[in-house]
Structure formats: C-alpha cells, structure tokens
Image: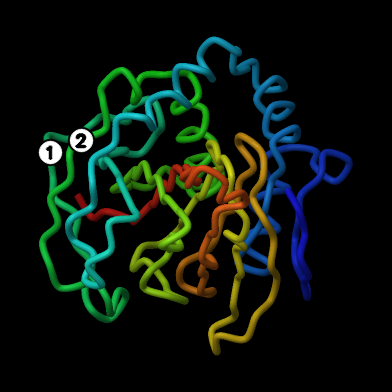
C-alpha cells in the first residue's frame, strides 16, 4: 500500500496492532483505517484462519467472469461487476446469503446512478464460500460490529474497472461520495497495466484527510460512512503498446444495521 499523503490518518501496521480492538479503536477515532496485505495475513494467522495460496488464485480468477454494468448514467462501458447480499443476525456464525436482492441507492448518496433499481448478476456461490471471502467478511464483522451482536444487512460487490488508450476507467464515477450505509470495506484484488486509482478520504466537509494507493492483493481500506467521504481517481493504461487493456479489480463489502 502506497501512502500518497495524509493528515491525521491511521495506517495500521503490525507493530501497532495487538488485536482487533486496535482496529476498532482507530476506526472510531478518525473514521477510516487502512491495513496492508501482510498485516491482514498475519492477523488471520493469529486467528487461526489463514488463507491458502490455492484459494487465493481461485478467488482472484473469479473476477474474469463479471458482467457489464449497464446502470452507469454516463453510458460508460468501463466497469463490470457482480453483487450479492447477506444477513447477519447477532453473531457471525449466523451469517446467511439472501435470496437475490437488487441494489439501490438514493440520489442523496449517488447523484449519478442513484434512484434506480439496479439488477446485477449474483456473485458465484463458489466465490462466496472461498476462505478468502469468508476471512474478509469475518474481519469486517469483527471491526464493524465490535462485539455488540447487532443485526446487519451486508452487500458484497465484485468490481472490475478497465482502461485503454481511448478511455480511462472510473472506479467511482459518482465522484466523492458516501454509500448510504454504516461501514465500508474496500479490498484490492488484482490490477494490471494501470496507473492512477488513488483512494482519497475526506472529512464531513469534503476536505481531504489522506490519500493512498491500494497496490497488493488484500490491501484493505475501511471507512465509517457516517463520518467520512471517499473517492477514487481515474485509472489510465500504463502501457498503450498493442492497445493493451488495463484493469483494476476490487471487492467492496458494506454493512448497514438492520432492525430485523
């Protein structure tokens, strides 16, 4: 993970991380944290929940089968995605995948694509069951729930954003935004032949707090959607020789408290 510049940021390194409570505390303090991939692996190992290389490869390859996002109001064809929803009732062990549900945001949170019922192909069942996905979901739950045993509505989004010589890719075409949830986890999965894609976190007045580049598999950023905004800069192809298409693959998991 490459730090671009920050003010009052919390980039969690292993030497500062004693347990999950450390992450919870820092997220509460400033509304955002980042965890580099090596720290994530070590946290998982300490929880006896390590991720195996074979599982990683299968998980990464699942991004090859996403479908074109036809709900982008700028008529761009640079983004593919899949989507799934889950319910957690009080404890992570009760997490269950929901029957298919559409994705919806109000225009208050998404001025570009909000106000529209969006139907995406579901994330493959085999992808949902991988140890990598489960580890990310469990990490998000541990930090966002913080032992309070709340009920959560969870959405997971696989994104691939492409860039080529004629067109840049837009990871967040809606610009600087909130998602209309409680918490968001953003995990880097893979990228090839791209530059850009800088994540910037903003305070409630949209003043920039920190900027960084998620570079490696399972570099992670988490935000409190009530207290900060976020956005990601466009990506461009690093090498245009042969019109090679570049891409940036992300998994985004959102948590919203449920009254059910």
* Residue 179: image tag: none
Q: Is residue 7 left or right of residue 111?
A: right
Secondary structure state at the residue bearing disc 2: loop
Counting from the top left corner in percent of width and height, residue 136 is at 51, 34
Image point 65% across, 22% down: which residue?
47
* Numbered label attached to residue 122: 2
Name the residue located 54 percent from the left edge and 20 percent from the top edge.
56
Residue sitting at x 38%, y 69%:
173
How far across and down, in percent of the image, does residue 197 sit?
57, 59
| Residue farthest toward the front in the current orientation of the protein | 242
95 w.r.t. 148: above or below: above
- Along the horizontal axis of the image, is 118 left or right of 28? left
Nearest to the observer: residue 204 or residue 47: 204
Q: Residues within 10 Å of mark 2 (few under 14, many from 20)?
A: many
Do labels 1 and 2 touch, CB within 8 Å?
yes
Q: Depth-wise, is mark 1 or mark 2 nearer the camera?
A: 2
Residue 100, which numbered label? 1
- Residue 228 as seen in the image, left or right of residue 8: left
Q: What element carries label 1?
A: loop
Between 130 and 192, which is closer to the camera in this rendering? 192
The x, y position of residue 41, in whole percent, is 69, 27
- Indicate the colouring scheme: rainbow
């Amino acid at each position: 993970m490459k730090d671009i510049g920050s003010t009052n940021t919390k980039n969690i390194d292993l030497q500062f991380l004693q347990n999950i409570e450390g992450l919870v505390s820092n997220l509460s303090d400033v509304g955002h944290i980042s965890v580099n991939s090596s720290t994530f692996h070590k946290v998982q190992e300490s929880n006896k929940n390590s991720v195996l290389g074979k599982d990683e490869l299968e998980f990464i390859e699942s991004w090859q089968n996403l479908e074109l996002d036809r709900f982008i109001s700028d008529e761009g064809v640079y983004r593919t995605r899949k989507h799934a929803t889950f319910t957690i009732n009080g404890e992570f062990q009760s997490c269950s995948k929901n029957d298919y549900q559409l994705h919806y945001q109000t225009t208050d949170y998404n001025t570009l694509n909000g106000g529209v019922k969006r139907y995406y192909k579901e994330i493959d069942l085999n992808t949902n069951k991988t140890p990598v996905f489960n580890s990310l979901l469990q990490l998000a739950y541990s930090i966002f729930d913080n032992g309070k045993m709340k009920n959560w509505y969870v959405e997971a989004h696989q994104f691939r954003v492409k860039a080529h010589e004629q067109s840049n890719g837009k990871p967040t075409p809606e610009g600087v935004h909130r998602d209309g949830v409680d918490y968001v986890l953003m995990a880097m999965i893979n990228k090839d032949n791209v530059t850009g894609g800088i994540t910037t976190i903003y305070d409630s007045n949209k003043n920039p707090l920190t900027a960084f580049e998620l570079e490696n598999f399972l570099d992670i950023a988490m935000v409190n959607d009530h207290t900060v905004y976020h956005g990601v800069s466009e990506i461009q192809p690093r090498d245009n020789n042969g019109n090679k298409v570049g891409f940036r693959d992300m998994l985004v998991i959102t948590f919203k408290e449920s009254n059910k």
